[in-house]
Image (cartoon, helix red, strand yellow):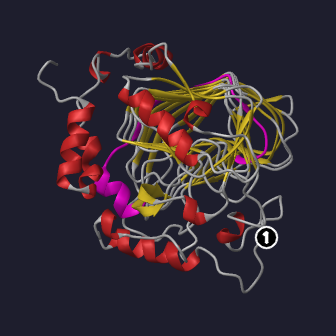
Amino acid sequence: MKNQPTLSQILSRRTLLGASACTALAAVLPPQEAAAATSPADPWERADWIVRSIRTTSFPDADFPITRFGARAEKGHDNGKAIAAAIAAAHDAGGGRVIVPAGTWESGAIHLKSNVNLHVQADATILFSTRPQDYPIVFTRWEGMELMNYSPLVYAHGQENVALTGAGTLDGQAGPDNWWSWKGPWNGTVEHGWKEGMADQRPARARLFQMAEANVSPEKRIFGEGDYLRPAFVQFYACDRVLIEGVKLRRSPFWQVHPVLCRNVVVRGVDIHGLGPNNDGCDPESVDMMLIEQCTFDTGDDCIAVNSGRNADGRRLAAPAQNIVIRDCRMKEGHGGVVVGSQISGGARHIYAERCTMDSPDLWYAIRFKNNALRGGLLEHFYFRDLTVGQVSRAAITCDFNYEEGADGPFKPVLRDILVQRMTVARAARVLDSQGLPGAPVGTVRIEDSRFDGVTHPSILAHSPDIRLSRVRVNGAPVQRL
């Protein structure tokens, strides 16, 4: 491995080549040591191997309080420059913790650098501006497509050994009076502020789709003022060794935790609450080697949604989301608990979830796969065990190949090798809603040693010929087929 380039060298070369070269990052990253060829064949042994193999962050024992750089916990005082100065000083010194002490600190976008841990202490709140001009245009990804758009509230691009930690709060201040109304029409559980006749994201979203399908270079897809494409909350882009731990995220404009093209990511003990439009909890996109554990999700969209790029952009990068372990998490409101898709054209494999609890009348599904014939992508090797579900309003498990644009398209999705073990559900309208496509059936789904109570409707099976049940009980009675 001595002759392999480091991530910093690769990113440096990419910078010299121009922004569009970042799209090739996944293709040129050096392979992780002890690569998949040496990993265990048994699924749960492989999950343990993933957790052991993730390279973790480590920081020098040096603190850089933002107050040293002029930060003031005063209403109306913008601390963005002071926080940036503290981050730069820590980075230049070889690394350390940038301390946000108790108090309320107003700021615009925060950009992290290598070897820096932004540590938000207990009783500290970073209160983010709601003015779009406080978020400069950066290279980012929006709904699975690369572009130049408003910076995420917390952002790092091409950095190594970087963290966001602490017991404090990051408050995006999003609501019906700002950010959320940019969505346009939406049928969520909270008021989001949009009324007929107001400007919204739909024209820009359609233009971005067209540019991606036409293979316009990402650095030429420039959006911002007047386009109404909301920024993500926390986004680490093309980073290696990332830690997000302990913080509370509140009132997000859009997706909340969004690592993209990252490797060696740990999200631990994060409390995420945001019920606005597209307030997904955590969206690992084209990520390799990741652990999500002990987190709480109460969201306006999917709690955890594994992604790998939308349509042509996902196929262009061809970077699957893989080797992701989810454990000991709690899911409340949301469209799905553990979800794969729908921005999944780059594929996904080796995803594990265990010992999670899910319960809300406003949680649609516990396990959810969503795809269509414009996305395509190879999705395989998904393992779930010891999931405790109080109630979901629709189905416990769904495989949906008709999501959004539906069945018309040349890129038939492939979904196979799904194993669910020891799942208990107290209430669900259906056990399974599995709908493949003609010529693209859902592959093998195995459900073992599981119990589903409070079921009121029969399962829906379309183009799903390989559903296997072993020791499954529905409303108390053993069943052999759904």
Side (left or right) of 228 relative to 242? right
Q: Position of residue 96 (x, y in %)?
A: 47, 22
Q: Which of the 4 image quarters holds residue 281?
A: top right
Q: Is residue 189 above or below residue 425?
A: below
Q: Quadrant of the N terminus?
A: top left
Q: Horizontal and vertical percent for residue 356?
A: 70, 26
Q: Nearer the viewer, residue 367 or 180?
A: 180
Residue name at image x 28 percent, y 50 percent:
22
Residue most extreme to the bottom: 197
- Left or right, 37 with respect to 370, comes to left
The magenta stretch spans residue 258: no
Work out whether residue 403 or residue 286 is closer to the camera in this orientation and state it. Answer: 286
Query: Does the magenta segment cover residue 313?
Result: yes
Q: Which residues are magenta?
A: 310-335
- Percent position (x, y) of residue 88? 42, 36
Q: The residue tagged with tag 1: helix, strand or loop?
A: loop
Which image quarter: residue 217?
bottom left
Of residues 46 and 1, the one nearer the viewer is 1
Q: Give percent across and percent down for residue 72.
A: 68, 40
In the image, what residue occupies the spot 45% across and 77% down?
207
Measuring 76% from the left and 52% from the top, which residue is drawn there?
Answer: 275
Which residue reaches farthest left? 3
| Residue matched to label 1 | 193
Q: Residue at point 44% right, 55% down?
A: 141
Give the answer, above or below, for where 350 lies relative to 252: above
Using the image, determine if residue 376 lies above or below residue 67.
below
